[in-house]
Amino acid sequence: MKGRLWLILGAVVGIAVAAGRLPYLAGAGRSLAETAERLVGSGANRLIRDAASAGGSRRLVLGLSGVVAATVPGLTALAMVAAARGSLRLRAVVALLIVALGATSFVYQAHGKATGTLLLALAVAGLAVTLTGPLVAAPLTALAALIGAESLPGLLTSDRTVTQASVNDLHVAVFNHPGTPKALQIAVLVLAAIPFAVAARLIFRR
């Protein structure tokens, strides 16, 4: 199966989990997705703390906080899709390196042993190429799709706490007083959706 099909299959599985069609995967899938979001969020929060400790203004820190809170789910999904595509590209390189390693055994070992080593290397390389899609790329894309399928509908809920907090933080950063105007709400929604759109494009791009 072509690599892109594994990405699409993973996305379908992730959406199915979010829709409750695969309940036996829901608990583990959501736990993994939440863990990934926390890892990305912790890195972003470190950036905010560094900005504050370096003497960044309160408005700068609030602006960073607002952007991070809005975009962490999308950036997490994007990172997973990028990793999935990367694994598909690297599998051929890994397979070639394994075969090359097996071939060099003819220099250091007797002919019989070297032949066996090369055959083993070919088998391992074949497994690396064959199993990367179902065991690496598809699960990563499924988690990305699960995050997207659960986050995007929530962004459209006007009273969503994280979205409103992000809007308010950005309003303070720009205008130096609290507020949640409709225009800024729409801007935050677009900002939050951009990483998901890029991730979706990567899934379907050849």
Image (cartoon, grey):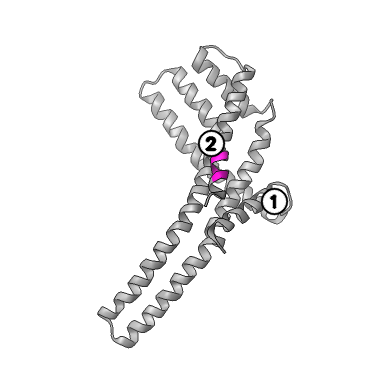
Question: Does the magenta run of residues contain 7?
Answer: no
Name above or below for residue 181 compared with residue 139. Answer: above
* Left/right of residue 175 with respect to residue 157 in the rendered view: left
Q: Which mark is residue 72?
A: 2
Q: Amino acid at mark 2?
A: Val
Residue 161 at x, y percent in the picture: 64, 27
Of residues 104 and 173, the one drawn nearer to the viewer in this rendering:
104
Q: Position of residue 19 (x, y in %)?
A: 72, 47
Give the mark nearest the N terminus, 1 or 2: 1
Q: Quadrant of the N terminus?
A: bottom right
Label the magenta part by its dominant secondary structure. Answer: helix
Part of the protein shown in magenta: 197-201
Seen from the viewer's position, the closer of residues 156 and 92 is: 92
Horizontal and vertical percent for residue 5?
Answer: 59, 57
- In the displayed orientation, state which residue is furthest to the left: 107
Q: Which mark is residue 16?
A: 1
The residue drawn where x is 50% and y is 27% is 65
Tally the numbered discs.
Answer: 2
Q: Amino acid at mark 1?
A: Ala
